[in-house]
Amino acid sequence: MPWNNVTLMQQITRFVMMAQSDQLTVTEPCEQFGFSRQTGYKHLDR
């Protein structure tokens, strides 16, 4: 079974999509992806 390689940019893109949804707060995807809230908000601003 091959490994599922995920780039950092793919992770950030998934994070932004989750954080911008109306179903979750920014804190929840930050915890899932291992980002601090400060880093999460920086990704959202970009």
Image (cartoon, rainbow, N blue to C red):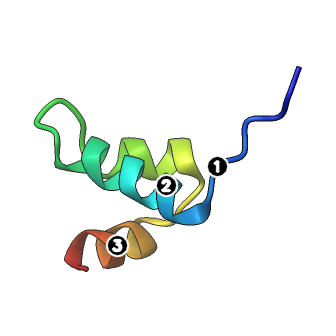
Which residue matches tag 3?
43
Q: For this rendering, which residue is in front, 2 or 27? A: 2
Q: Are marks 1 and 2 in contact (CB under 8 Å)?
A: yes
* Position above or below: 38 against 11: below
Name the kind of residue labelled 2 in the image: Gln
Could you tell me which residue is drawn at 39 percent across and 47 percent down? Answer: 14
Circle 1 packing at 10 Å, graded few (<14), some (14-19), many (20+), is few
Q: For this rendering, which residue is in front, 2 or 10? A: 2
Q: In this view, does 5 lie to the left or right of 23?
A: right
* Position above or below: 43 against 22: below
SS for tag 1? loop
Could you tell me which residue is drawn at 72 percent across and 45 percent down? Answer: 5
Name the kind of residue labelled 3 in the image: His
SS for tag 2? helix
Which residue matches tag 2?
10
Circle 2 packing at 10 Å, graded few (<14), some (14-19), many (20+), is few
Q: In the image, which disc is placed on residue 17?
A: none
Looking at the rendered image, the disc whose residue lies closer to the viewer, 3 or 1, is 1
User: Could you tell me how far apart the alpha carbons at marks 2 and 3 are, in whole angstroms?
Assistant: 12 Å
Q: Are marks 2 and 3 in contact (CB under 8 Å)?
A: no
Which residue matches tag 1?
6
Name the kind of residue labelled 1 in the image: Val
The quadrant in which residue 16 appears is bottom left
Where is residue 15? Give x, y as percent.
39, 51
Q: Do the residues labelled 3 and 1 touch (CB within 8 Å)?
A: no
The quadrant in which residue 44 appears is bottom left
* Position above or below: 30 against 43: above
Q: Earlier in the sequence, mark 2 or mark 3?
A: 2
SS for tag 3? helix
Could you tell me which residue is drawn at 85 percent across and 29 percent down? Answer: 2
User: Could you tell me how far apart the alpha carbons at marks 1 and 2 are, in whole angstroms?
Assistant: 6 Å
